[in-house]
Image (cartoon, helix red, strand yellow):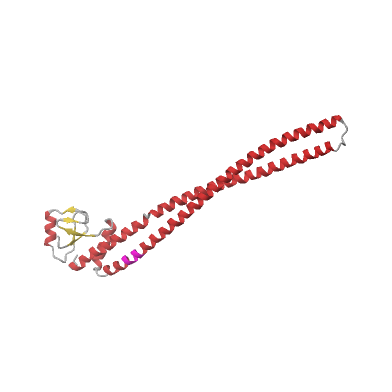
Amino acid sequence: MKATPENQSILLDLQAVDTRLDQLAHQEATLPQTAQLAELTERLAELNTDAVNASTELSDLSQDVRKAEDEVEQVRKRTTRDQELLDSGSITSGKQLEEIQHEITSLLRRASELEDAQLEVMERAESVQSRVDDITGKISEVQQEHAKVSAGREVAMAQIAVDRADLDSQRVGLASRVPPDLLALYDKLRDTLGGVGAAPLRGSRCEGCHMQLPPTDLKAIVEAEPDEVVRCEECRRILIRTANS
């Protein structure tokens, strides 16, 4: 394959642009914000699950509190009714009076037990409510951090898009100055050789694979016509002869 030295040298500029495009693609794929967002999203999911569980527990406890309040109220009403009956003087039977007094004593004991149970449930509800508030606060903090990191990622992505558009434009201009057959070979080599299809020859070293060329290979390259497209015998990349070759 033949191409003018000028056409061949353009490949180095094209390679530089393509390398930068590859670097941008890697940068885009490995933005630290992306990993941070994944961690924050996972953390939010965990907190939301905790919030649902705590809220469910709080709802159940609230029902228990209301139930306890109702039971206490019923016992108090019954106690009041018995006490009013006792105070009315309408009961003359000693046995009946004794029964009512015994019932009042039992009701007061029951009311005390229910109030203790009610207090215990209320304390548990307060503890769970505190946990709900704590989780809610953490969710808010993580959401704010998520928004901040997301905004930073958008800025980084926007800059990458600007840089890529500029490089794409440069690539179109450079590629248009390379003969089609040489460009096709270069693109094919890039695809199969880790993104590097052309490299300069510096002294006796191929800058593509960083191998020193054997004297016989180097002699053949040096003696080749300027318009002859030469390739590294080690890595098969296109070698561009420069003033340092």
Magenta-colored stretch includes residue 165:
yes
Between residue 201 and residue 64, name the one nearer to us: 64
Q: Position of residue 225 (x, y in %)?
A: 13, 65
Q: Is residue 168 found left or right of 79 in the rendered image?
A: left
The quadrant in which residue 244 appears is bottom left
Between residue 99 and residue 80, name the one nearer to us: 80
The quadrant in which residue 30 appears is bottom left
Q: Residue at x 43, y 52 (%)?
A: 38
Q: Position of residue 90 (x, y in %)?
A: 88, 37
Between residue 222 and residue 147, name the one nearer to us: 147
User: Measured along the vertical axis of the image, is residue 243 above or below residue 130?
Assistant: below
Location of the N terminus by quadrant is bottom left
Q: Which residues are magenta?
A: 162-167
User: Measured along the vertical axis of the image, is residue 82 above or below residue 157?
Assistant: above
The quadrant in which residue 228 appears is bottom left
Q: Residue at x 83, y 37 (%)?
A: 87
User: Measured along the vertical axis of the image, is residue 180 above or below residue 26?
Assistant: below
Q: Position of residue 166 (x, y in %)?
A: 32, 67
**Magenta stretch: helix, strand or loop mostly:** helix
Q: Residue at x 66, y 37 (%)?
A: 117
Q: Is residue 156 found left or right of 206 in the rendered image?
A: right
User: Measured along the vertical axis of the image, is residue 209 above or below residue 111?
Assistant: below
